[in-house]
Image: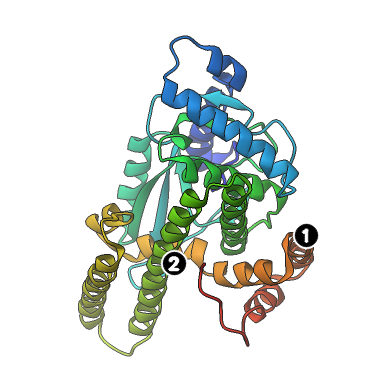
């Protein structure tokens, strides 16, 4: 996820840019070196353990994944809350494509981030009043693309060691590769590096039990992505149909009921796992679907290329993609696995 504090303020955008800049500056002002956080006598032992793990992961990201060697994720901030920002995603009533907002540096992205949950909810309510489907989701980390030294946050440390590794690799990957305005490719790239990095890290440390657990987690993640991708296709067909608005609303509601049933069927194969239970417990709509497909659209293609050609060739290919016009870039990414089926996650 990307969020860059912007000081270029004008017109009606003033309140949004101000909260982004103020939130970013407040966060940076609270940074302490990891060594200082570890030495704090009042620091919880669970946080010390997680920070040591994060520090090792950070070094691995440089030495084994060729991710940026800078000051990002070498300091710590305890925000005293569960999320660093809350993203607002919106889509039209009969579209599964997310609305976009355009900003300096980051370009056009499919979300709008707030450091205050209430502010995010107020903005989402305004969009809902205009007839849009909206979704507000908490985010535990973001990248400033290396423009600032992003710290490790307490929000990154509470979901287990897999998550710590995933988020550090993911956010550093954004610093390695980013195309302004291409959210789907940016997120797929970072997710591909995240997956590849975690598996390499667990193999490197000899954590075979952890590797097996992570692979099972990844299998559930792929099941979830398939469910959402199928729902996206189902909704596209409905929204393109020559039917009345009332008929379309009924078909839309029925399609989401089908998704819930499909999830219940898949979940039974997961045993006791409840990875995506909370996602399905809150209302489902177009914006919620779009929040997932932004990450998953190109991920199978990039994963395929990375597995087939290796990390350095993957980085070279991404640099080449950055030079292509958008339509040509999409065609090239689509071609990666066009004639060869994607191997099962091992």
**Residue plotted at (26% across, 76% down):** 255
User: From mark 1 to mark 2, how far is it between C-alphas?
Assistant: 25 Å
Q: Which mark is residue 193?
A: none
Label 1 crowd bin: few (<14), some (14–19), many (20+), radius 10 Å: few
Badges 1 and 2: C-beta atoms under 8 Å apart? no
Left or right: where 18 falls relative to 42 = right
Image label count: 2
**Residue plotted at (63% across, 48% down):** 204
Q: In this view of the protein, which residue sits in the foreground, 208 or 285?
A: 208
Residue placed farthest to the bottom in the image? 242
Q: In this view of the protein, which residue sits in the foreground, 218 or 149?
A: 218
Label 2 crowd bin: few (<14), some (14–19), many (20+), radius 10 Å: some
Q: Position of residue 6 (x, y in %)?
A: 61, 37
Q: Is residue 291 visible?
A: no
Left or right: where 124 falls relative to 343 = left
Mark 1 or 2 closer to N-term?
Answer: 2
Left or right: where 332 falls relative to 112 = right
Q: Which residue is mark 2?
A: 222
Q: Which residue is mark 1?
A: 312
From the viewer's perspective, is residue 294 above or below residue 234?
above
Q: Position of residue 54 (x, y in %)?
A: 57, 34
Q: Position of residue 346 (x, y in %)?
A: 52, 67
**Residue plotted at (49% across, 32% down):** 19
Label 1 secondary element: helix
Q: In this view of the protein, which residue sits in the foreground, 5 or 224?
A: 224
Label 2 secondary element: helix
Left or right: where 53 falls relative to 138 = right
Q: Is residue 197 visible?
A: yes
Q: Quadrant of residue 302?
A: bottom right
């Amino acid at each position: 996820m990307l969020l860059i504090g912007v000081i270029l303020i004008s017109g009606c955008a003033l309140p949004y840019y101000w909260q982004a800049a103020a939130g970013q500056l407040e966060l940076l002002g609270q940074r302490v070196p990891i060594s200082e956080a570890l030495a704090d006598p009042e620091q919880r032992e669970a946080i010390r353990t997680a920070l040591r793990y994060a520090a090792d992961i950070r070094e691995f990201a440089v030495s084994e994944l060729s991710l940026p060697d800078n000051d990002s994720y070498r300091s710590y901030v305890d925000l005293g809350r569960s999320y660093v920002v809350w993203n607002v995603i919106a889509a039209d009533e009969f579209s599964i494509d997310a609305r976009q907002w355009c900003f300096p540096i980051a370009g056009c992205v499919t979300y709008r981030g707030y450091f205050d949950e209430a502010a995010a909810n107020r903005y989402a309510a305004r969009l809902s009043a205009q007839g849009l489907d909206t979704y507000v989701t908490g985010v535990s980390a973001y990248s400033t693309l290396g423009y600032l030294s992003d710290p490790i946050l307490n929000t990154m440390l509470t979901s287990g060691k897999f998550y710590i590794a995933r988020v550090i690799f993911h956010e550093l990957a954004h610093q390695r590769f980013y195309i302004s305005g291409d959210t789907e490719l940016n997120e797929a790239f970072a997710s591909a590096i995240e997956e590849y990095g975690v598996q390499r890290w667990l193999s490197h440390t000899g954590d075979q039990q952890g590797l097996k657990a992570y692979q099972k987690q990844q299998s559930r993640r792929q099941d979830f992505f398939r469910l959402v991708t199928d729902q996206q296709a189902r909704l596209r067909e409905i929204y393109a149909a020559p039917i009345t608005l009332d008929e379309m609303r009924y078909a839309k509601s029925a399609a989401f009921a089908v998704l819930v049933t499909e999830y219940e069927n898949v979940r039974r194969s997961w045993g006791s796992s409840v990875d995506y239970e909370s996602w399905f417990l809150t209302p489902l709509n177009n914006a919620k679907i779009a929040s997932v497909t932004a990450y998953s659209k190109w991920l199978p293609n990039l994963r395929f290329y990375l597995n087939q050609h290796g990390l350095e060739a993957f980085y070279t290919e991404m640099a080449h993609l950055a030079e292509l016009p958008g339509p040509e870039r999409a065609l090239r990414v689509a071609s990666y696995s066009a004639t060869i089926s994607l191997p099962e996650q091992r």
